[in-house]
């Protein structure tokens, strides 16, 4: 079942923001796009990270979940040296136990951003 949130960026290619499959919701990689303008967020890495996490949370909430329901994060960054900033933003959004995650350095992110995050959300249907 497709998941859509008007509070997350409109897809720029043939994909959905998220898909429910049984008790799980798979959230497509989100980047630091300003939902109001549709343009990439410029500014500090912290602001880009916060914007990207907020886009992930918007789709999570559209599916009926919260940050606490996210069980796995796939994070792609252009500057692995900034992982401390990423960790600080993560601690602001999530509480222990934190979701499982991997952080992968990449050369480029679509639309010139510095971070992309996809997620897996556990939402039992009879919750």
Image: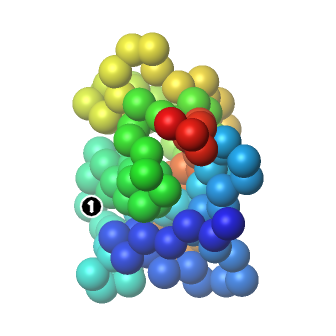
**Considering depth in this image, is 126 or 70 the residue closer to the camera?**
126
Dot 1: few (<14), some (14–19), or many (≥20) neighbours within 10 Å?
Answer: few
The image quadrant of residue 18 is: bottom right
Residue depicted at 60% across the width and 24% down the height: 100
Q: Is 28 located above or below residue 87 in the figure?
A: below
Residue depicted at 55% across the width and 50% down the height: 117
Whether residue 56 can be seen here: no
Q: Could you tell whether 18 is left or right of 79 in the image?
A: right
Q: Is 84 located above or below residue 54 in the figure?
A: above
Residue 57 lies, in percent from the top left, at 40, 51
- Extreme residue in the top direction: 97
**Considering depth in this image, is 57 or 101 the residue closer to the camera?**
57
Residue 36 lies, in percent from the top left, at 27, 81
Residue 31 lies, in percent from the top left, at 49, 62
Q: Is 49 located above or below residue 109 in the figure?
A: above
Total marks shown come to 1
Q: Mark 1 falls on what kind of element?
A: loop
Residue depicted at 50% across the width and 36% down the height: 127
Q: Is 96 located above or below residue 58 in the figure?
A: above
Quadrant housing the N terminus: bottom right
Residue 55 lies, in percent from the top left, at 40, 59
Q: Could you tell whether 46 is left or right of 100 in the image?
A: left
Residue that carries the numbered disc 1 in the rendered image: 43
Whether residue 118 can be seen here: yes
């Amino acid at each position: 079942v497709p998941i859509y949130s008007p509070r997350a960026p409109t897809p720029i290619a043939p994909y959905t923001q998220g898909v429910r499959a049984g008790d799980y919701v798979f959230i497509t990689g989100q980047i630091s796009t300003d939902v109001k303008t549709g343009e990439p967020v410029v500014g500090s890495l912290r602001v880009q990270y916060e914007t990207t996490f907020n886009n992930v949370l918007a789709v999570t909430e559209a599916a009926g979940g919260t940050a606490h329901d996210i069980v796995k994060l796939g994070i792609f960054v252009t500057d692995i040296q900034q992982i401390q900033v990423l960790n600080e933003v993560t601690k602001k959004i999530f509480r222990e136990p934190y979701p499982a995650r991997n952080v992968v350095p990449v050369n480029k992110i679509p639309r010139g951003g510095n971070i992309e995050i996809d997620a897996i959300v556990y939402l039992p249907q009879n919750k």
